[in-house]
Image: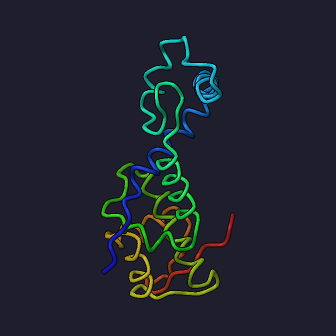
Amino acid sequence: MTAHRDLATPLGRARMLFAMLSAPKLRRALGDLLTGAGPAEDPSVHGPLSRLDWLGEEGEVDVEALRDTTDALALMRSSEAILEVGRLDGIPVPTEESREVSGRIARIVFERVGVERTLGEAELNAAIAMFAADVALVRRDAVDAGVLTRSADGSAYRLAPPP
């Protein structure tokens, strides 16, 4: 069995950077720091900027940390991502979040086996099990969300046509 890479830190780093870049005040402060204009005068940006573990107080960049982040993002965009990331042990509890995650899993399954295919319950369960531990929840949520259609007897599943 292959050990999965620890992607939590580099992906967390990327999420934090994207969140900061969406806030104009933080984007300006980060830009000033990186371009050598110095640390921001506004104390409200010091807290968020101090959480960037790849950026020193004077704007020096930890190139290795950024390289890890770039590599993790590239991996997550590739078809090899599934080989590096473990399956979900839990699905979000709120119904909308659960259905969103389950629907995405179902779409990925059918993208890989063929969007026109019909899968039996056992075959669908095996495919879902590659992504999530609770296959019944994912299957049910995907049907409830309208992503999958189920035969009247519950023995066959298809990807629902786009709305």
**Residue 74, image x and y in percent?**
57, 61
Res 39 quadrant in image: top right
Is residue 21 toward the left or the right of residue 80 in the image?
Answer: right
| Percent position of residue 2, x then y | 34, 77
Q: In this view, does 87 lie above or below 96?
A: below
Closer to the camera in the image, 119 or 74? 74
* Rendered-image quadrant of the N terminus: bottom left
Most foreground residue, 160 or 50: 50
From what the image shows, is residue 99 above or below residue 27?
Answer: below
Count of numbered marks = 0
Quarter the C terminus occupies: bottom right
Which residue sits furthest right?
Answer: 163
- What residue lies at 53% left-to-right and 59% top-to-bottom? 71
The front one of 160 and 110 is 110
Q: Residue at the spot x=46%, y=25% of the render?
A: 57
Q: Give percent across and percent down for residue 8.
A: 39, 53
User: Which residue sits at x=53%, y=62%?
Assistant: 76
Q: Give the answer, above or below, for where 39 lies relative to 132.
A: above
Task: Identify the image's colour scheme: rainbow, by chain, secondary structure or one colour.
Answer: rainbow
**Image position of 50 (left or right of 31):** left
